[in-house]
Image: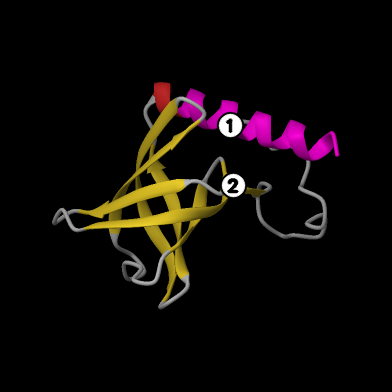
Amino acid sequence: MRAPGPPPPGRENDSRRVPRYPFLVGVEVADESGIQIQGQTKDLSIFGCSVDTTNPFPQGTRVKIKIAHAGQNFESFGRVAYAHPNSGMGIVFTSVEPQNDRVLEWWIADLAQGLNSR
């Protein structure tokens, strides 16, 4: 099990299980029927991310998410935890393969280190 890192500055009183880190990169999200949504992540944690998009999938939709950053690719199955029209959606990662888990952990460690060095 992954150990949570320190919370990002300004989120010390956040009640989430693990910290979320600001993370702005392009993302592709597809539902089971193959409909794809392009967007941008807002933040990232070891359990999921927030996605900026004007047309989010409805809450509960099962999706596949793809993120590319710093020469690494991450893919996971997930579920839409919340959706706000014209704003975005939160996605919980539900099935992450070991190689993708390593990429995610590397990104989180890099984000945590960058925030702690400011």
Residue farthest left in this picture: 33
Residue 10 falls in which quadrant of the image? bottom right
Residue that label 1 marks? 107
Q: How many marks?
A: 2
**Mark seen at residue 3:** none
Q: In which quarter of the image is the N terminus?
A: top right
> Can you see residue 96?
yes
Q: Magenta stretch containing residue 114, yes or no?
A: yes
55 lies left or right of 113: left
Magenta residues? 101-118
Percent coordinates x, y for residue 109 in the rendering: 66, 29
Element type where label 1 sits in the image: helix
Q: How is the protein colored in the picture?
A: secondary structure
> What amino acid does circle 1 point to?
Trp
Residue 113 falls in which quadrant of the image? top right
Percent coordinates x, y for residue 18 in the rendering: 66, 46
